[in-house]
Image (tube, grey):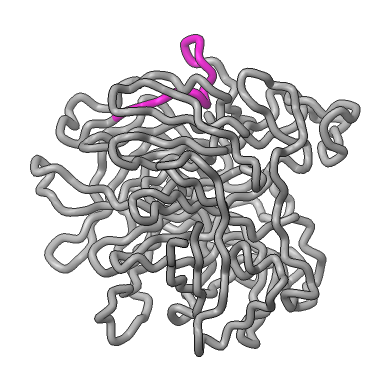
Amino acid sequence: MLNVEWSFGAPDIPHGTQCSLSGVLGDSWILALGNRANPDWSKTGGKGPAGGCWTGGYSLPTGATAAVRNWTGLPECPSCVKDIHCHLDFPHWPSCTPGGQTECCTGECGNFVSGGSSAQTVQLPATLGGGEALVMAGGFSHVESTAACYMLRQDGGGFNWTALPSLPYPIQTGGLAQSGTKLIIVGGGNGAKGGTVWSDVNGTAFGRRVWILDLAALADGWVAGPDLPGSPREMPTVVAINGSVFVLGGLAGAKNPPTKPPVNCSLGPGSPGVTIDNCGANIQDNWRLDSSMKWSPLPSNNLTVPGAMPNSVVVADRYILTIGYDRSDGAGAITHPSTTLSPNFGSGNQINASCLKTPPPAQPDPNPYSNGVTVFDAVTGTFGAIRSTAASGSGLTIPEGCPQEVGIPFNCFMPNIALSKEGELWMVGGECSPFILNGKDYWHYPTLVMRGELTVV
């Protein structure tokens, strides 16, 4: 459906970044909040802090007339108060102390209209002065969720943060889109530490809830929308096209995860203990919410593993391009109305060592990252893929016959992406398997910036 010609887009970003607010304001690509990551973490064998909170951000000129492309710092979000709870569930992260090595922001990995859920720029109504903004709604710091909401807008040549009405309760990693003057959040989890999409909220699973904020009527706050009729989920793709909201893929964590002994979910569906009670699952059922607020089912993705797909862009008001990742640990998928685990409909895509050079890490990266990209045609209701090539004179090598041709040029989970006004795809960061490109080593949180020229085929 789409061809992408990749090139090295700009100087490396100053540090790794993940789960960030990512989108375009004017002629600038904005990256803010999320996880400020140590790019060399896997190089050191997982020793030392992997990262911490990022309350600031960067802008990068992406317009066609930009003579120089360099990263410029943005002001910190004044209300993103750092907390000291921080990643206590990860043994390689030291316990936090005020001013210590690792601190986390309650806005990390939020439900973003840009980046964390979909790279779309919000159009503000006249009551808010018009113009554009990027919105963060909710999020988590690996220990607790937040109900806080903020928007970042460009005003008088600078960038400023403004608080929006808080969510009714803390929500993490839902999907957020804009339809008209309304922001619509779908699904999400209820807590980073032991939270689940299955928790009951007034008779409805947490990951099925829908909340709506009318930017033209902020005093009304967030109001409940029609519950998603399908599987509860977090980290879905949620985008709006021509008045309809599309909800694709996502992840459902285990209903009642065991503590001891652990279940080997990688054994797959049908194996002892491998059920939705004990293992997470990719979500196969997809849905559309029309302008009359009525849900209807969409076809399942039969090409690639759906999984967590929070990063997406809309191309030509038709094609939803999303970068997903199998987060079921091999347990499989569920398709509404069943909660029985079954094999994924599609297959994950992964670049092997013969196609992509990799530096020798101090310890092998245990994560099965993929380079898969899914494209959904909102007009025909069909799934497709991309074909990647190296732009002429880019210095980038993508060997023919390698899986790089049908995905991004390396194996990665949740890179930050955005679509410029000129229709170029920009990508940086994420959590990746180590790789070598252009003669440079990149590790678990790469700082490499890629630019892709998109063509509809």
Residue at point 48% right, 30% down?
287
Q: Is residue 208 magenta?
A: yes
Left or right of residue 441: residue 156: left
Above or below — where is 63 with respect to 22?
A: below
Residue at point 64% right, 49% down?
325
Can the viewer see residue 49?
Answer: no
Can the viewer see residue 254?
Answer: yes
Question: What x and y, as percent, mark residue 370?
Answer: 68, 57
Query: 443 or 246, which lies in front?
Result: 246
- Outermost residue on the top side: it is 203
Above or below — where is 325 with respect to 30?
A: above
Which range of residues does the magenta coloring cover? 201-212
Question: What x and y, as percent, mark residue 29?
Answer: 34, 66
Please tell me how many numbered marks the rendered image carries.
Answer: 0
Residue 149 occupies which quadrant of the picture? top left
Above or below — where is 334 with respect to 449?
A: above
Residue at point 39% right, 52% down?
314
Left or right of residue 212: residue 2: right
Left or right of residue 435: residue 1: left
Residue at point 48% right, 49% down?
108
Query: 230 or 303, which lies in front?
Result: 303
Question: What x and y, as percent, mark residue 37?
Answer: 56, 63
Q: Is residue 130 magenta?
A: no
Question: What x and y, as percent, mark residue 167?
Answer: 35, 30
Residue 39 occupies which quadrant of the picture? bottom right
